[in-house]
């Protein structure tokens, strides 16, 4: 799809928050074909094989168009950064005045084509964001697949927010499929409680990210 087609839901519904990926990248899911011999649906094999030749396109022109076309909607962004270069791309648009703090950085780990899922990768991402943005950003962790809970826990212990759900991982534990995103949320809540961390309410989260409020969404 064109970037304009991708943006139709955002332009129509004017959400409080939308994802914005901060760079183009190879996005490889095909190694899963060697891990799972039996797939449930015909489209799964084709989808995974095609990712060997997939470029996830988010050019500077695309990003600029998204930022400018959504400005009047009051929609803020979850800036998804899959690698260190994406943090520098974000800094480029901050320097141009197209992005205002506080901005929400979702650090994504464990996707083939982006930064890995090692604890040192998480630390490198955080150190770079701190150096580039100081106190101007809100940090969050997204670990793909088996990286979900370990990296979320490590990030939370260092002051990060966390993201879980079936879009990012199908698992609740080693070899056991999650029944729902809700099950994963319940799991990470228990971990956060164990770390003596407080869970934000929806209103507190809106205030933290300076969102416009549910009443301003075009539903």
Image (tube, helix red, strand yellow):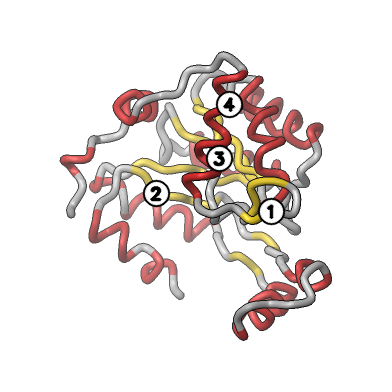
Q: In the rendered image, which residue does mark 2 sit on?
A: 18
How far is disc 2 from disc 3 in space, using C-alphas? 12 Å
Q: Which residue is mark 1?
A: 176
Most foreground residue, 54 or 181: 181
**Of circles 1 and 4, which is in front?**
1
> Residue 160 — which label?
4
Residues marked 2 and 3 touching at CB (< 8 Å) = no
- Foreground mark, 4 or 3, reads 4
175 to the left or right of 60: right
Residues at marks 1 and 4, CA–CA distance in whole angstroms: 26 Å
- Residue 118, image quadrant: top right
SS of the residue under disc 1: strand
User: Which residue has dot 3 on it?
Assistant: 106
Q: Nearer the viewer, residue 97 or 17?
A: 17
Tag 4: Cα neighbours inside 10 Å, few (<14), some, or many (≥20)? Answer: some
Q: Which residue does the image show at 31% across and 66% down from the upper left?
A: 8
**Is the residue under label 1 in contact with that under label 2 (CB below 8 Å)?**
no
Q: Earlier in the sequence, mark 3 or mark 1?
A: 3
Q: Quick check: 29 above or below 79?
A: below
Say few, some or many: other residues with alpha carbon within 10 Å of mark 1 (under 14 / 14 to 19 / 20 or more). few
User: How far, Cα to Cα, is label 4 from label 2?
Assistant: 19 Å
- Residue 167 placed where, x, y %? 54, 56
Q: Earlier in the sequence, mark 4 or mark 2?
A: 2
The residue under the point 77% across, 37% down is 121
Q: Quadrant of the C terminus?
A: bottom left
Q: State the image coordinates of residue 4 (x, y, percent, origin top left).
A: 37, 68
Taking the image as drawn, is residue 85 in sight? no
């Amino acid at each position: 799809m064109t970037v304009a087609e991708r943006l139709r839901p955002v332009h129509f519904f004017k959400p409080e928050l939308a994802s914005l990926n901060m760079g183009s990248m190879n996005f490889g899911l095909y190694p899963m074909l060697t891990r799972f011999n039996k797939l449930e649906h015909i489209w799964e094999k084709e989808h995974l094989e095609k990712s060997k030749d997939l470029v996830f396109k988010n050019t500077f022109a695309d990003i600029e168009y998204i930022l400018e076309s959504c400005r009047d909607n009051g929609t803020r962004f979850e800036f998804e950064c899959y690698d260190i270069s994406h943090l520098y791309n974000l800094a480029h648009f901050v320097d141009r005045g197209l992005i205002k703090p506080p901005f929400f950085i979702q650090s994504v780990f464990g996707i083939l084509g982006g930064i890995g899922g090692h604890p040192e990768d998480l630390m490198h991402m955080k150190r770079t964001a701190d150096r580039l943005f100081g106190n101007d950003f809100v940090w969050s962790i997204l670990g793909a697949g088996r990286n979900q809970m370990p990296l979320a826990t490590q990030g939370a212990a260092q002051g990060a927010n966390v993201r879980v759900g079936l879009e990012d991982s199908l698992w609740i534990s080693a070899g056991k499929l999650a029944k729902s995103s809700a099950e994963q949320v319940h799991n990470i809540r228990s971990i956060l409680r164990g770390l003596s961390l407080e869970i934000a309410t929806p209103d507190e989260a809106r205030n933290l990210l300076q969102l416009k409020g549910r009443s301003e969404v075009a539903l």
